[in-house]
Image: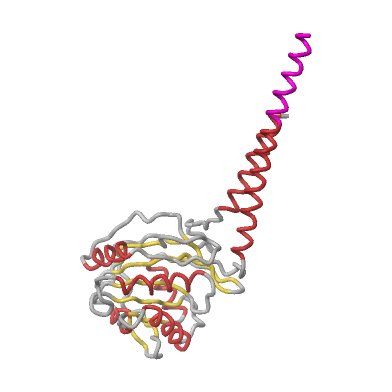
């Protein structure tokens, strides 16, 4: 009977582990429909890409360079990870010793071709406010574009995403560009408790180091594959579900351990009883 317990133990540990660490995955296989990041450090972005800024004006990518750039790719109607990522960035940027607009720029580009300059303007207003009054608003641009320019941009940085019924599935990453538009580094989210209402936090040291490397035109490879993804199908309150699964898994493990201890004690008592009978 004791032997039969161990397979059950491993099964419960596996199920509990799945609930406790519901991590994202990186397909990274380049197949149609796959989502992920393919590092393209050292490559130049097309400078002739044309987008519309939050005022509706058309602007070329080349006109937004000339300084190190933090590039973020999101869609403005997202209600899942994108707002948390932008919020984390808005909290971190004012703490940098570098000044947005003078020392670097932030470009947030929507990969949803249906997003409009009005949506970009409203989104920008929220995160500029979150960054605080000391943050120069001119240092952060929110852009929209058509399918062709979006496709060229995402392909040039190796960013693949997939449209779903209720939004997009896509990776979450910061991409650092040199003043000439060369891809310098990819930086993933440093902390996030998936499925929970927990703020994304960026290290000011990591951001400063990446911007300094970009300013020097250096390229840094070795991007970690434990990517965070934003899933369109993640329903509100999903964090409660995963907490429930985690609790169930923990209770099951504790019950199993208790049962195993009970069997051990019962077996010892049984053996002692048999030894006592034989001695008599």
Q: Magenta stretch: residue 270 in it?
A: yes
Figure quadrant of residue 105: bottom left
Give x and y (percent) for residue 85. 44, 70
209 falls in the magenta region: no
Q: Main secondary structure of the magenta part?
A: helix
Q: Nearer the viewer, residue 219 or 93?
A: 93
Name, please, the residue furthest toward the front: 280
Q: Name the quadrant of the N terminus.
A: top right
Residue closest to the eye, 278 or 221 = 278
Residue at 24% across, 62% down: 218
What coloring was used for the rendering? secondary structure
Q: Which residue is more in the foreground, 8 or 30?
A: 8
Report the residue at 72% width, 19% height from top: 271
Quarter of image, res 256: top right
The front one of 117 and 207 is: 207
Q: Which segment did they paint magenta?
A: 263-280
Q: Position of residue 155 (x, y in %)?
A: 41, 68
Image coordinates for residue 229, horizontal then vertical, percent: 50, 63
Task: Give percent across and percent down for residue 118.
Answer: 46, 89
At a point 61% along the width and 58% down the height, the residue shown is 243
């Amino acid at each position: 009977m004791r032997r039969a317990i161990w397979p059950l133990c491993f099964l419960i540990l596996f199920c509990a582990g799945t609930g406790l660490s519901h991590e994202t995955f990186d397909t990274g296989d380049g197949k149609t429909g796959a989502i992920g990041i393919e590092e393209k450090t050292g490559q130049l972005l097309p400078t002739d890409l044309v987008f519309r800024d939050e005022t509706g004006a058309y602007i070329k990518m080349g006109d937004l360079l000339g300084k190190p750039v933090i590039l973020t790719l999101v869609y403005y109607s997202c209600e899942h990870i994108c707002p948390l990522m932008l919020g984390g960035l808005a909290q971190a940027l004012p703490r940098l010793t570098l000044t947005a607009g003078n020392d670097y720029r932030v470009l947030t580009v929507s990969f949803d071709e249906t997003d409009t300059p009005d949506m970009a303007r409203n989104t920008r207003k929220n995160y500029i406010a979150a960054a605080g009054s000391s943050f120069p608003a001119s240092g952060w641009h929110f852009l929209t574009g058509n399918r062709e320019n979006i496709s060229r941009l995402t392909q040039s940085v190796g960013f693949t995403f997939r449209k779903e019924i209720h939004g997009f599935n896509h990776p979450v990453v910061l991409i650092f560009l040199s003043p000439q538009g060369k891809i310098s580094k990819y930086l993933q989210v440093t902390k996030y408790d998936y499925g929970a209402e927990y703020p994304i936090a960026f290290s000011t040291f990591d951001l400063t180091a990446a911007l300094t490397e970009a300013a020097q035109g250096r390229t840094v490879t070795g991007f970690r594959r434990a990517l965070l993804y934003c899933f369109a199908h993640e329903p509100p309150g999903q964090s409660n579900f995963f907490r429930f699964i985690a609790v169930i898994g923990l209770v099951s493990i504790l019950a199993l351990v208790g049962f195993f201890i009970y069997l051990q004690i019962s077996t010892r008592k049984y053996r002692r009883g048999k030894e006592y009978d034989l001695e008599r």
